[in-house]
Amino acid sequence: MGRLPGESSILNHANGLMQSVAVVSTFRAALYRDAAFAALTPAQARRCRLALKRVIGAAPGPSINSMLQQRIHVNRTSPIALRRRLIGGAIAGTAWAGVSPLMAQTYPARPIKLIVPYPPGGTTDIVARAFAELLGRELNQQIVIDNRPGAATHIGTDVAMRSAPDGYTLLLSTSGLATNFATGPVPPFDPQKTLAPITQINQMAFVVCANPSAPFSTVRELLAAARARPGRLTIGSASLEYVAKLLNAQSGIDILHVPYKGGAAAMTDAMSGQIDLAVALVPVMLPQIRTGRLKPIGVSSEKRVGALPNVPTFTESGESKFRVDSWYALHAPAGLPGAIVRQISEAARRVLTMPEFVDKQRALGSDLIWSTPEDLALRLKTDTEESLRIARELKLSPAG
């Protein structure tokens, strides 16, 4: 097979080609199946043509159309490896023509703003501030926290996505980017298109707790009590109807969900016996568990949580498939240059392996996770699809 002129340049600069996974997929097919521009939609063809002109437009040889008709032989590069390289650039949202190589080389030249879509003092804010301090140290620049709470994180996310894609505005995002489409309020934007993924930061399980005097202390005892009294036991949470209904559906039980405006109120009523159970993220519940004011029954993760090693998962019981988690991540406005994405991602990787940060976060019930930008993009996509599927099964109607 003949080698496409300028192929190395295309591969090296593939991140300047793609703006969406759809274009990646179609263009990849063009490279491997001898497809010409006729195989692309007009919009995709125009974007491919412009991108190719930027890379090889001045090079001698056949026209761009005929180039795409030729077979491409990637020297010792498998289709899967090429796909990862192409999609990696695409998902990082690196095709921003207005950014010069010099800008990427001098970044960061001034303080960076990290938008946190929650109020100061909460679990998310605490994690964000600890992470930002260390990330700023790695980037040799100050990172300033900008709390923008409200509308189920939509306000802060909207501010971030409307900012310039220059690396000086970042967003501490949450799994709500995926679940809000199923549980509401539905965001007026598509985060998969308006945000550039950088890395996942952590993963957290939910824990179901009861009053210390409750007649059940294990997952099996709770399930038995719920099956003996369907619809009689109550579980409180702040905006976690989705999680409560998932517990019912995946455990074959019927526990009545009681919504609260805040998690503290739900925990208070569980401690006083006003409701039978409360469910929240492990870091939220941990202080009450450690003081003995709440009794942990089980966690929703695949494996036991490091901060609660003696608390089993629901799946360990053999009578429940209840499994769900939450996460924090780092995003930026779509169009962030690839060099800057990689710089921030690598700095975050170093932070997420620092013993001082790892130990502290694990003690708070948070398991740290570093991911590539493409892995984070894939997680957001699959979590969104899974949340919508489960919401349909549970007949949840998200508010607009």
Image: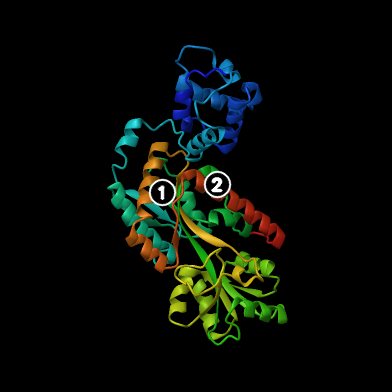
Q: Nearer the viewer, mark 1 or mark 2?
A: 2
Identify the residue under disc 1: 170
User: Looking at the picture, does residue 91 appear above or below residue 37?
Assistant: below
Give how far across and how far down residue 333 sits, in percent.
Answer: 45, 44
Q: State the mark number for residue 378.
A: 2
Disc 1 to disc 2: CB gap under 8 Å: no
For the image, the number of numbered tags is 2
What is the image's colouring?
A: rainbow
If the image is split into quadrants, where does the N terminus sit?
A: top right
Please tell me how crowded label 1 is: few (under 14), some (14-19), or many (20+) other residues with Cα within 10 Å. many
Give how far across and how far down residue 84 sits, in percent.
Answer: 52, 37
> What is the residue that sits farthest to the front in this orientation?
76
Is 301 left, or right, of 105 in this rendering? right
Residue 196 visible to an observer of this rendering: no
Give how far across and how far down residue 180 sits, in percent.
Answer: 58, 57
Give how far across and how far down residue 269 sits, in percent.
Answer: 54, 81
Residue 71 visible to an observer of this rendering: yes
Please tell me how crowded label 2 is: few (under 14), some (14-19), or many (20+) other residues with Cα within 10 Å. some
Q: Residue at x 52, y 60 (%)?
A: 326
- SS class, disc 1: strand
**Could you tell which of marks 1 and 2 lies nearer the N-terminus?**
1
Label 1, label 2: how far apart the Cα atoms are? 19 Å
